[in-house]
Image: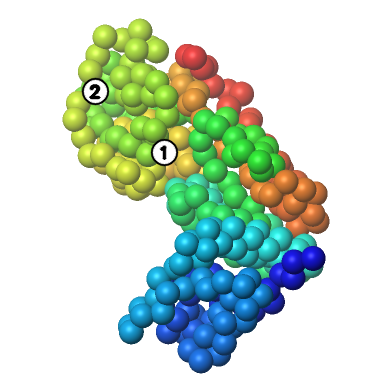
């Protein structure tokens, strides 16, 4: 029966093959180059063939090493993921959440203190990024993401259907009586939604309203919260996203003069590794989100949707 090389030898081989340097691999693993070289020799003894060509200042993989490396790397990655998943189940007092910067800034952060107060036993961490994170590698427990598609192989729960409507500062709203009046205002463009299919922003809204109008050029923002901030300051009219504008609309800091709204072809989803959705910490988060979103669902019920 073939004997598997020791784990330390496999780990040393993976690092050295990735770096193509014994010195860099040793530094990563916090061992001496001599110790790492010993582990590589151990692996070669178990395998019965060399995996590296040793040169004066560098190493190269042999044909056997080249064939071995991808499978070893994949195996270690799988092992690390399994270990991280198990650790997250054991350390249930920690909850790490990732969401986009705009949603974190305008929806999650202003409300999260209520969740923290109700769950003092949980240590909360947040990662505000649009980058797709690896749950195991990045030690993320749950993600809140906006998009059109589910994440394959993960638990996906649609928590919100996003929609937009024209919003503006109350002083600007005094000038608006009919949709045509919007053309007298500066237009603000939120380009964060341009990845959505069949979405053109202001032209979509004007077409849905049956208006043969063209929006004027205006400042364009890659981040939705920055566009919302300009609208809050009185800088113009924005097709504001419901989730990001709800608090400001409730407080009267923004005004939505028309009931007509557009459903975006995208939803907010809560995503986590399959099976983790029922863990106590994530279940508490899901229950809290359901309660907190009731006010936004109530606002949605007052709108007249054009699509």
User: How far, Cα to Cα, is label 2 from label 1?
Assistant: 20 Å
Q: Is residue 156 above or below residue 37?
A: above
Q: Which mark is residue 60?
A: none
Q: Residue furthest front?
A: 48
Q: Are marks 2 and 1 in contact (CB under 8 Å)?
A: no
First in sequence: mark 2 vs mark 1: 2
Query: Which residue appears at 41% of the width and 79% of the height?
Result: 54
Q: Is residue 56 above or below residue 131?
A: below
Instruction: Estimate the x, y position of residue 101 in percent, counting from the top left.
Output: 45, 52
Which of the colour schemes (rainbow, by chain, secondary structure, one colour) is used?
rainbow
Q: Is residue 41 visible?
A: yes
Position of residue 113 measured from the top left corner of the image (x, y, whole percent): 63, 60
59 with respect to 49 (left or right): left
Q: Nearer the viewer, residue 229 or 176?
A: 229
Q: Quadrant of the N terminus?
A: bottom right
Please state if 304 lies on the left or on the right of 226 as rendered: right
264 left or right, relative to 291: left
Q: Residues within 10 Å of mark 2 (few under 14, many from 20)?
A: some
Secondary element at image label 1: loop
The crowding category of the residue bearing disc 1, from other C-alpha atoms within 10 Å (few below 14, some 14 to 19, many at least 20), is many
Q: Which residue is mark 1?
A: 254
Percent of width and height locating residue 241: 45, 35
| Foreground: disc 2 or disc 1 | 2
- In this view of the protein, can residue 252 be seen by the observer? no
List the residue tagged with mark 2. Answer: 215
206 shown above or below 86: above
What residue do we see at 33% from left, 37% from top?
191
């Amino acid at each position: 029966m073939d004997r598997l090389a020791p784990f330390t030898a496999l780990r040393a081989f993976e690092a050295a093959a990735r770096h193509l340097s014994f010195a860099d691999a040793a530094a990563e693993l916090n061992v001496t180059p001599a110790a790492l070289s010993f582990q590589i020799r151990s692996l070669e003894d178990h395998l019965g063939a060399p995996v590296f060509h040793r040169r004066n200042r560098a190493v190269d993989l042999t044909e056997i090493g080249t064939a071995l490396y991808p499978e070893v790397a994949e195996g270690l990655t799988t092992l690390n993921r399994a270990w991280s998943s198990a650790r997250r189940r054991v350390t249930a007092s920690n909850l790490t959440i990732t969401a986009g910067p705009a949603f974190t800034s305008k929806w999650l952060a202003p409300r999260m203190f209520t969740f923290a107060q109700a769950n003092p036993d949980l240590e909360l961490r947040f990662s505000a990024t649009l980058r797709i994170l690896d749950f195991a590698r990045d030690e993320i427990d749950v993600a809140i993401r906006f998009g059109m598609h589910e994440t394959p192989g993960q638990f996906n729960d649609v928590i919100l259907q996003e929609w937009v409507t024209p919003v503006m500062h109350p002083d600007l709203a005094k000038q608006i009586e009919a949709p045509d009046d919007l053309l007298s205002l500066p237009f603000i463009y939120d380009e964060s939604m341009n990845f959505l299919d069949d979405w053109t922003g202001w032209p979509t809204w004007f077409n849905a309203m049956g208006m043969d109008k063209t929006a004027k050029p205006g400042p364009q923002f890659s981040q939705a919260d920055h566009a919302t901030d300009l609208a809050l300051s009185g800088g113009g009219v924005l097709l504001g996203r419901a989730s990001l504008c709800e608090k400001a609309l409730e407080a009267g800091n923004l005004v939505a003069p028309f009931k007509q709204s557009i459903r975006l072809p995208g939803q907010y989803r809560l995503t986590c590794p399959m099976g983790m959705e029922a863990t106590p910490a994530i279940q508490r988060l899901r229950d809290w989100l359901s309660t907190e979103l009731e006010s936004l669902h109530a606002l949605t019920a007052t709108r007249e949707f054009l699509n």
